[in-house]
Image: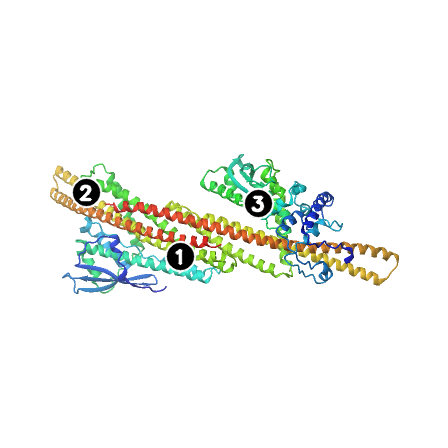
Amino acid sequence: MAAEREPPPLGDGKPTDFEELEDGEDLFTSTVSTLESSPSSPEPASLPAEDISANSNGPKPAEVVLDDDREDLFAEATEEVSLDSPEREPILSSEPSPAITPVTPTALIAPRIESKSMSAPVIFDRSREEIEEEANGDIFDIEIGVSDPEKVGDGMNAYMAYRVTTKTSLSMFSKSEFSVKRRFSDFLGLHSKLASKYLHVGYIVPPAPEKSIVGMTKVKVGKEDSSSTEFVEKRRAALERYLQRTVKHPILLQDPDLRQFLESSELPRAVNTQALSGAGILRMVNKAADAVNKMTIKMNESDAWFEEKQQQFENLDQQLRKLHASVEALVCHRKELSANTAAFAKSAAMLELLSDYIRLIAAVKGVFDHRMKCWQKWEDAQITLLKKRETEAKMTVANKPDKIQQAKNEIREEIEEWEAKVQQGERDFEQISKTIRKEVGRFEKERVKDFKTVIIKYLESLVQTQQQLIKYWEAFLPEAKAIA
Amino acid sequence: MEEHQEAGKEIKPSSTLVDLQGDSSLQVEISDAVSERDKVKFTVQTKSCLPHFAQTEFSVVRQHEEFIWLHDAYVENEEYAGLIIPPAPPRPDFEASREKLQKLGEGDSSITREEFAKMKQELEAEYLAIFKKTVAMHEVFLQRLAAHPTLRRDHNFFVFLEYGQDLSVRGKNRKELLGGFLRNIVKSADEALITGMSGLKEVDDFFEHERTFLLEYHTRIRDACLRADRVMCSHKCLADDYIPISAALSSLGTQEVNQLKTSFLKLAELFERLRKLEGRVASDEDLKLSDMLRYYMRDSQAAKDLLYRRLRALADYENANKALDRARTRNREVQPAESHQQLCCQRFERLSDSAKQELMDFKSRRVSSFRKNLIELAELELKHAKASTLLLRNTLVALKGEP
């Protein structure tokens, strides 16, 4: 069996990996065309693009245990990949063996009618160094603002259009400053495209702000009262934070869909985000199916890191929810207080951050779920392979003439196929695990920064409020003394 | 229901509400109060060197209904028609906090033990505060009566203070309550009628002015009282909100492993302290502002009542005049009409005089009390604001200092 595999190019020469990757570009474009013809293979795929930036974080030399122990692995189905084994990546993209069919993810989700506006080759316009530099995080030179909500249209067909302004010095954008008009469903469309492409590979895609039928209807109906302006303002702030989080992610930043969203003046209308559309209902059904699936999969979690992290995130989620509820009560009461005393309510900002994070954590959980699914597929593939082998063995034992030979050959082919699938499943699983680890690390860092900044801002605003209070009371005091 | 023993010595809020002339010949105070199930029993202690009393120091136990009885006795007494009768103390009402305590007891399991303990503490403090307040109200009522040169000599008052046994004043039964209610309606209708009567001219500018002022004032102060109550409530809710926030933050903090840990813990501490501060702000506001407003709302109502009585007397006087004229023209029963008219005239004049005095007293009392309370309120608010600024600044420095 091992002979049928090409030995993976385990080199120390990292640049060579990258060169292979460049070959992988062509592979990629060719597969785009194969994709059109074979749309329904439900395998999780890996985008070479991600490998590029993931590698740029300093690939370290490490052993790859896997290939040598392939057979053991098939028997035990335990994984022992160390965290730092970036050599795996080149294998995936550069092996042009026909057994591997890297399929772009858009094909994966057959029911989703995403527009195939994914122009894959565009990703590789940039040189490797640029990519590495930018993906290193600190030199993020892109600023996004969402402003100027205006009402477009009338009655129930009205919507709010927001101006999305981008200021950047990144070369992947054609201009350094530009702005476009987008509506809420455009944002949702962007999110669903990004999610469908990246979630199942293990990246944490920031969640989009939630729909609110009540709020939107109020705006549509044209009530110019403070609650609808508040709603629009909240939504605008939420959209801005969403975009900022998305571009902070080095991988997502390079996605062509994101760029199209930021740059092009006309965007194909994302109809699937309507609450009551066919796609919406399908999404709900899928969600339900997922939930059931989750309950039935009993994953043999062999990696303690994941278990610990998942537990951590569960706890964090609960805590944040509780905190969120309390802060909501605080906001409510402060609002009452301010209505009664004409002061200001600053805890709303805290609230915003908390609800954002609750949803982010849900996204993280989603990523973990995908990993589980990946694992399951791998398991299935292994089981099928085993069965096929058994059949083959039985046949050899049975020892019948010609007809059997043909059948045997068929079985042989099938076995080869399934072996490949198993390998693929395994590789994908590892890939996703690795990606998740990195993502979680990045997420944590971001989280710490985020929380700190918001907390500091909140406290500072509290200080300000108190100081103003002091001013007012000091002014009042002499007047009180003058009462006669 | 728990029993709360109150050593009334510390309670001396009467001086903040009412400026009493330090007349020491009759000193009344509520030295003790006990809350039993539905009732509160006050121990009224009197110190007096008046010859009327049998001893110089004595005390009795009274309940709320007996206070009301005393008040009504004053109101119904014709002799005091020209005086502002101090408003009756409000009924002790623990319903709200009792409910909250109960709800907390049934409570949900999502709150941790520390949270529960803290909330229970808060509620108990609230209960205690209400209790103290009601004792103070009753005391102020008695003390104003004792300070007033005319009212203190009332026989009923003496009985109230001295009679050792239960005054067996039952609470008003439904008929009496209804009667009282109807009487109020009649009174306001009457008032409207009198003022609407064309023939009735206010002879004295002073009273005219006072009347309009009082009416306006009363409504305004009622509004202000409501709003102050709402502000105080919000402040309290705010302070209570900090409890779960602080608890959630500290559990988040214990869970975290990175730099956020210390930040969260510090935040939790901050919120805990902020909570105490806010709580104090709320209670200060309550004491200085709301209580004062409430008291003067009732007092101004009493003043309005006085004015009404005077007006009524004036109307009677006018009627008597007319009757006299009629009698004179008919030349029958002139004598009784005349004496009746005389009576009314005297009454009216007496009322006017004392009313004038009373109203001026009222005004000065009111002004000085407002002044005092508002100054104290402003100073306290300043103190709290400064304290919380300091607290926040310290936490900010600590947070920023960390990597």
**Can you identify the residue that label 3 sits on?**
A247
**Of labels 3 and 2, the one closer to you:** 3
Considering the numbered disc 3 on the image, is that residue within a helix, a strand or a loop?
helix
Q: Is residue A270 left or right of residue A36?
A: left
Looking at the rendering, which quadrant does residue B204 occupy? top left
* In the image: residue A69, left or right of residue B35: right
Q: Secondary structure at mark 2?
A: helix
Q: Amino acid at mark 1?
A: Arg
Of callouts 2 and 1, the N-terminal one: 1
Q: Are marks 1 and 3 on the same chain?
A: no
The x, y position of residue B180, in whole percent, is 28, 51
Mark 1 residue crowding within 10 angstroms, few (<14) / some (14–19) / many (20+): some
Name the residue carrying label 2.
B314
Question: Disc 1 designates what residue?
Answer: B273
Residue B170 visible in the displayed image: no
Q: Which label is found at residue B305? A: none
User: Looking at the image, is B320 positioned above or below residue B9?
Assistant: above
* Drawn side of residue A403 relative to residue B266, left or right: right
Q: Position of residue A232 (x, y in %)?
A: 50, 41
